[in-house]
Image: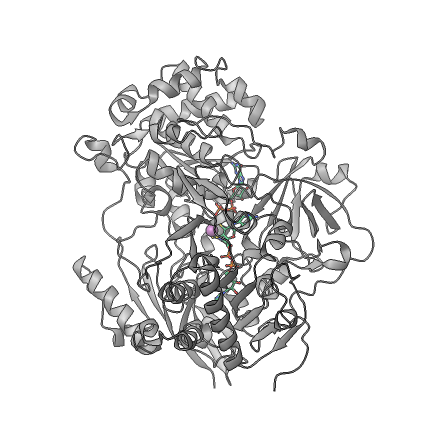
Amino acid sequence: MAVIVPHAAHWGSFDAVVEQGRLVGVRPFARDPNPGRLIEAVPDAVHAPSRIDHPHVRAGWLRGERRGAERGDRDFVPVSWDQAIRLAAEESARLRAEHGHTAIFGGSYGWSSAGRFHHAKSQLQRFLGLGGGYTTQVTNYSYGAGMTLMPHILGTNDVIQGPVTSWPSIEKHTRLMLCLGGLPLKNALITAGGAGAHEYLPWLRRVAAAGVRFVNISPFRGDAPDFLNAEWVPIRPNTDTALLLGMMQALVAEGLEDRGFLATHCTGWEKLRPYILGESDGTPKTPEWAAAITDIPAAKIRALAWEAARLPTMLTATWSIQRAEYGEQPWWALVALAATLGGIGKPGQGVAFGYGSMNGMGTPRRGLPSVSLPATRNPAGLAIPVARVTELLERPGEVLQYNGRDIVLPDTRLIWWAGGNPFHHHQDLNRLLRAWNRAETIIVQEPWWTAAARHADIVLPATTTLERNDIASSSADRFLRAMHQAIPPQGQARNDHDMLADMAEHLGFRDRFTEQRDEGAWLHHLYERWRQACGRMGFEAPDFDRFWAEGHVEVPPPEEDFVLFADFAADPAENPLNTSSGRVELFSETIAGFGYAEIGGHPRWQEPKEYLGAPLAARFPLHLLSCQPATRLHGQLDSGRVAAESKIQGREPLLMHPGDAAARGLAEGDIVRVFNDRGACLAGLRVSDGLRRGVVAMATGAWWDPAREEGSLDVHGNPNVLTQDVGTSRLGQGSAAQSCLVEVARFEGPPPPVRVHAAPRRLEVAS
Ligand SMILES: Nc1nc2c(c(=O)[nH]1)N[C@H]1C(S)=C(S)[C@@H](COP(=O)(O)OP(=O)(O)OC[C@H]3O[C@@H](n4cnc5c(=O)[nH]c(N)nc54)[C@H](O)[C@@H]3O)O[C@H]1N2
Ligand SMILES: Nc1nc2c(c(=O)[nH]1)N[C@H]1C(S)=C(S)[C@@H](COP(=O)(O)OP(=O)(O)OC[C@H]3O[C@@H](n4cnc5c(=O)[nH]c(N)nc54)[C@H](O)[C@@H]3O)O[C@H]1N2
Ligand SMILES: [Mo]
């Protein structure tokens, strides 16, 4: 007899179908208009051979190998939970005592679970904070550069995180939508905290049916779904800033700039204008100038600019655009173009980032909070920008500059990760590994033998969400979802909260950590806090018992359309922005004052070191885009059927233009070696004329599988062995993964096996 219980994940809500203690299937949440396929992979992942069955300790670590030890698929010794808890607690206490709290790196970046109580990173940070503090991180990989920039120039990150001007406003008022990076469908499979309703596709269809004209400005035609009938403008990667400057020049040359808006709502036009016209540096940023950089014809650039001046236009860029060298620039330039057009704050006009980057952007929402674990204080108070983790480990005692601050990097002795995978998310993995091995001890809590777990010293097996009770919740989704426990913990897996509570007991603060609540009491407590907050905002949610029995709460969307910056547009004196000037900053005195040579006071074209126009392109003539995967969430679900079906002989596909393939004698289905000076990986070739020449694309998320006997060739297809690890600039210090040049050649001979979805070798069976 099957048991069916409500559950949820970042990639969708579902009903779990359980037979005899095993998850045997999933059924999409009945209220989801467009559930997507990723949920189908959940049973495979939950029962995968790569689940960690016991706590493990690296054999060398037990022998005393600490700093500089080689890690990665070394022999692991299974140990009891008692022993694992004691080893982790005592080691962390020793390192705290000897090297101070900041020697513990507990940034622990990562997506973890949609369930908000058992959210592993939040649990770990609560534990480390109560234990005395730790080094943490700020910003994110998604839009680290953008979220540091926007408060300076627009006074808010709402323009990235929402609420942004809603789809109904676009449907009614927008006539032209210019989309840098397109409006990819695949990204909207995901909502952080749980996708109860996938509403992006239905909204896109409505907006298309309303007659909006779409322009997909991207190296990849597939970034716009066919039904949009978008015009494809295949831009050279990393050159969007030049395109936008060229468009602004075309507007100014014809007197089409909105002088009123620039005078009353903006500051710094008198500094940006001479740059655009070439008066300040001798180079007018004409469409002809931009054409040479972007490879878009000057006539097209001019036509787009004039059309945008004529029609109510919404401007958008995906988050990926700023994940590149000088990634602040294209986003700043897009804000400047929106200001030049005067549309900011008008219905269906202006600018917002990420309509095509995540489900829920632009979906009408009530602005209610989400359920979450209350934040705990970090008494150590030290944070690095997240994507500078390798530098943190490489350069103890040295200074890292970030957004006007000088951060003295601590000497990291203990790395502790729960709910993230640095060997998925970080760039230049071979360099990361060298830096990683400098730590004395590495503790990883994970359900699966991911690369992070394989490169740890103490490996603690965590339950998956199916093995515990929780609540999925996102302010960008209208369904709060009950996540009922479906199956017992697999192997010896334990909840992150429970293992940390036991460690807290060892260290003398169990009650402060648990607040003397068990799982059930916590869920009641968090829900009740949320219910009261909603009540204060005019939404009456049902009591916990009714929510839990019904499986969800629906928050009805608002009646009115939302227009971002509408109040500011109507009266900038009465409703100023939260910037230094209260206006849109086309020139920022603050940023200029930081004195960073690579980023000035206004947006400008900065030539990346790795793009098709760089000297390095002579040796590595292909620009690699490493995009979000359509077949999983980052590294999560890589062991499931949806990801497996997409692979070629078990390798991640690499997309390439037929002309580039022919020039290398390559054909569809070949196993190829993708390489540059930083590393190499294998991939399966997929040929497509939907990608512009000179560009190759590969999704992130295939688990890193370095074959050490092959000189660290990653045999599976993780693009982060190739990407460079530099900050976007000292302002944002974001990830610059999208600035990456490579070459591709056929891999001769039988490709080495992919072994990463099996458990690593271990020394003895636990008693
Ligand atoms: N080259 C390149 N690299 C990129 C990007 C790119 O565009 N290009 N994108 C970047 C972006 S935007 C992001 S957000 C990052 C994502 O990077 P991550 O968030 O680190 O990637 P995930 O694979 O989602 O990692 C989450 C981990 O948590 C584990 N986990 C899940 N549930 C639990 C739990 O209950 N307990 C514990 N202990 N663990 C759990 C999962 O097994 C998984 O290993 O990647 C970044 N990396
Ligand atoms: N299915 C699925 N969806 C996801 C995720 C996932 O792992 N799987 N991850 C989620 C997360 S954490 C995030 S942060 C978002 C990220 O969302 P994004 O960062 O927006 O996603 P990407 O796929 O990296 O990029 C979108 C498109 O931008 C284009 N692009 C890249 N470089 C350039 C450029 O220089 N110029 C122009 N004009 N276009 C360019 C690429 O062709 C690419 O397809 O996605 C979220 N959605
Ligand atoms: Mo992200």
Residue 210 appears in which quarter of the rendering? Answer: top left
Looking at the picture, does residue 328 appear above or below residue 18?
A: above
Q: Nearer the viewer, residue 427 or 3?
A: 427
Left or right of 143, for residue 516: left
Looking at the picture, does residue 671 appear above or below residue 610?
A: below
| Res 22 seen here | no
Q: Residue furthest right?
A: 749
The percent coordinates of residue 124 (x first, y second) are 42, 65
Q: How is the image coloured?
A: one colour
The percent coordinates of residue 45 (x first, y second) are 56, 69
Q: Nearer the viewer, residue 367 or 106?
A: 106
For the point 70% across and 62% down, the residue is 754
For the point 28% across and 74% down, the residue is 524
| Res 661 seen here | yes
The percent coordinates of residue 345 (x first, y second) are 28, 35
Residue 260 appears in which quarter of the rendering? Answer: top left
For the point 47% across and 80% down, the residue is 487
The percent coordinates of residue 547 (x first, y second) are 28, 72
